Image (cartoon, rainbow, N blue to C red):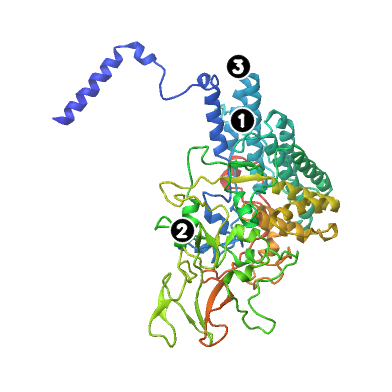
Amino acid sequence: MKNFKYIYLVIFLAAAGCSNDEFLDREPTDILGEEQVWGNEDLVFSVLADLYNRLPDYQGLENWWEYTNFDEAFASNAGDYGRHQNQEYSYGDWGMWDYAYIRDLNLFIERCEAATALSTESKASFLAEAKFIRAMVYFEHVKRMGGVPLILESMEYDYSGDPTYLQYPRAKEHEIYDFVIAEMEDVKDDLPNGSTKSRATKGAALALVSRAALYAGSIAKYGQLTPEVSLPGGEVGIPNSMADAYYTTALNASEEVMSLGTYELYNQDPDKSENYTNIFLNKSSNNEVILAKDFLVQGRTHGFTIETIPRSLREENTSGGKLNPSLNLVQSYELLDNTFAELPTKDASGNPIYYDDPMEIFAGRDPRLLGTVIVPGSSFRGKKVDIWAGYKLQNGSVITSDQLGGQAQLPGSSSSVQVVGFDGPIDQLEWSAQNGFYLRKYVDTSVGSGQRGTGSAVWLVRFRFAEILLNAAEAAFELDQLDKAAEYMNQVRRRAGFPVDLTPSEIDFDRIVHERKVELAFENHILWDKKRWRLAHRIWNGVSTNLTNNPGDALAVSTRVFGLKPYKYYEPGSPNNGKWIFEEFVPAPVFNAHRFRLGNYYSFISDGVRNNNPKIIRNPNH
């Protein structure tokens, strides 16, 4: 009977509704019409906020695993070991072809231009912001795909059976860069000078010009090293003759950011390592950040700290410790006398070097190392992180455990003692420091940020002033303005803690590459920098080599992720008993070298895209 009662109720309500014409004519209450949206600035901003939120980040705080695709880090998560086991990059990796997004932006711009209820000031601001987002989206396309169709108006199908009028060919690669640059120059003065970090500003528009022009200049210059990575129509590849003009644009845009007086290097903490860390944690008084994805502004948090916090300090039992920075990166941090050196694990005779404290092996290096990486012996959240691999005996054997903090008996002892750290490293024990390191950068120090019910509100920095200085240094170097190149690079290095400047004669391509590597580590630059310099196929060449002994060499092959095991030395009666020794190693899941092929410089355009539009030609080497 109960079911019949429900049926009768539905019939009654339907009949009652049909008997009243006014009911059918009522406006829906759960859908806003265009007039309602474009008559209310708050509603317009809510639409714009969604467009901001869709900006893509190949590497970011919501997808930690992408940081482990190259040589910056190891993925201490069993489901991601494949990133180190069969790493021939797919032609489709990091690709993008999102014209639904571009259509939404074009529609927003058209409707904003047609709106009559908005103030002149608000209308100009909304338009400038939407054009900034659209330029960012086209920049994301071109750095992945090369030239793409440049569509600047919404298109509608007329259902005539002939869709050819909707089919646009690919623009030349340089035309997309030119559009991004020209669009930002056009709208920059309609944007505020500062006052926000999560929305477009004049500084953000100029930062995009700085980065885009630098990329285009690099492709124009270094693309000549890979002539087979080009297309005769210019959809891929930029003429070498355009390089200097792009470098000049990049330098001018960078210097215009400097002249705004809005941005400066963050330099508030006397401890240089902590100062560097706090660039990414301190939101309240930070004039270095130009544009960031601020999750708290969106009323949400993320789980990056949950996934990456050291194992012994985690606040959830189901995660932690998944991202281990590589020894490749760690040894790239030079000494404070401006020289490069391997970590000293052995003396000239090949014997182990003994240390009283595990931190000693990292002493005298660029402070950005400890601001980026949690190394053996260091602390986090006021607690010592327990990274050590076991006891090394005189005969070379090791006493350890397959359990974190595990215990065993040492020779000559009748009781058990701890023989491995509570943070690892233990081979193939996921969610621990499998290669001897944890990430420090972006990991939240706030209690509760490692819990799923709370999460972290640390922002993802997209543009910051240090990058602008390095962009300017690189552009000036390429234009043979070495005095400027040295001054801009040295500003970044002085803030880092280097007591002696580099001279103009010491600025070379290797220095440009290195400085970006350490200053911008884990900031979604590694892939795009190596691609634009045409270095990627040379350093990730598929050959399983040893760890380079020249970390300052831009061409040093780095195809496998290395680690560092700290051991306590055990030889009672020896002056070295209880001291620390270190051994470089390759984590067990790393058994294949990264291989970047020429076809990886530009991603694959899907068969579906090309079938729908025969004017779209393939990328080279696909």
Dot 3: within a 10 Å radius of its alpha carbon, few (fewer than 14), some, or many (20 or more) residues? few
> Image height check: is 6 above or below 291?
above
Q: Disc 3 marks which residue?
A: 116
Question: For this rendering, which residue is in front, 288 or 4?
Answer: 288
Report how far apart the C-alphas of labels 1 and 3 lie in the structure: 18 Å
Q: Nearer the viewer, mark 1 or mark 3?
A: 3
Quarter-of-image position of residue 294: top right
Label 2 secondary element: loop
The extreme left residue here reads: 1
Q: Residue at x 65, y 22 (%)?
A: 121
Identify the secondary structure beneath mark 3: loop
User: Which residue is under mark 2?
Assistant: 320
Please give the name of the residue rendered at 41% of the width and 21% of the height, measured from the top-left corner: 28
The residue that mark 1 highlights is: 106
Q: For residue 252, say whether it is visible.
A: yes
Residue 142 placement (x, y as % from top left): 67, 45
User: Measured from the top left, where is residue 306 in percent x and y?
Assistant: 46, 53
Q: Marks 2 and 3: which is nearer the front?
A: 2
